[in-house]
Image: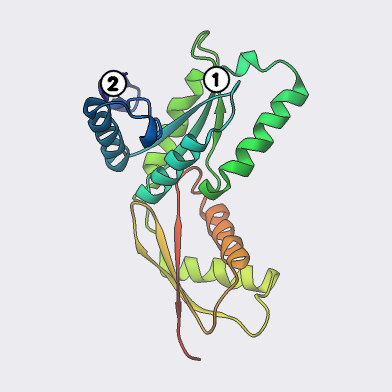
Amino acid sequence: TRDSTDTLGETEDGPVVFVDTAGMRRRSRIDDSAEYYSLVRALRAVDDADIAFLVIDATEGVTAQEQRLAERIDAAGCPIVVVLNKWEMVDTGEDRENVETELKRKLHFVGEAPIMKISALTGKGVHKLRPVLQDAIEQFPRRVPSRDVNLVISEALQRLPAGCGAMVMYALQGATDPPTFTLFVNRELPQSYIRYLERSIREAFEFGPTPIKLRVRRRSE
């Protein structure tokens, strides 16, 4: 594929446009201007997408280029679903476990993105993609009342205090697409604790594969 290809599909949830992007190689391996502009258009499609399926060859694992592409999708802020294709060709349980472990290690920054195991050749598992897609799209513009956000944060602080006198004084959702929450704190929070608060929000409001963003602002007590 040298260019992004749009396909209109009719689903139970209405029409969906699927954009098959061109294969993305490292810039040092791009041979001509046509391929370069094909890459630019593919990246633009990622930026404009409502949801992205990151398709990975399960027999090869996560490449450095796929890591960079996942970072681009994460930066764009759209939901991401990791699709492990050719899953039927990974033979043993140990091999499959190794593939999943490597994937979670290399794509740890995409958080709770669902991992779908499919076979494009046989169609196995493909039917599970649409419900995941629809759930992510429904959650993307969702807004949570501030009182509910603060209740979840308060309970999270009680379960596991931040330590060193650090406190979240107030929290609110400042934006949607993706849901973005601002935490007003009295002092800096460790990144590990911010991830803990993010998980608490995600689990409490069942955001599923939709990415959520946390912004931390420091205020005096």
Q: Label 2 belongs to which residue?
A: 2
Q: Is residue 76 visible?
A: yes
**Viewer-nearest residue: 66 or 26:** 26
Callout 1 secondary element = loop
Left/right placement of residue 32 relative to residue 57 reads left
Q: Residue furthest top?
A: 122
Query: Residue at the spot x=30%, y=43% of the render?
Result: 47
Q: Residues within 10 Å of mark 2 (few under 14, many from 20)?
A: some
**Viewer-nearest residue: 209 or 135:** 209
For residue 14, above or below residue 165: above
The image shows residue 140 at horizontal and vertical percentages of 37, 47
Left/right placement of residue 50 relative to residue 57 reads left
The image shows residue 94 at horizontal and vertical percentages of 77, 25
Amino acid type, callout 1: Ile
Label for residue 190?
Answer: none
The image shows residue 80 at horizontal and vertical percentages of 44, 39
Q: Residues within 10 Å of mark 1 (few under 14, many from 20)?
A: many
Q: Label 1 belongs to which residue?
A: 118
- Distance of label 2 from label 1 (alpha carbons): 24 Å
The image shows residue 129 at horizontal and vertical percentages of 47, 26
Query: Residue at the spot x=52%, y=41% of the render?
Result: 113
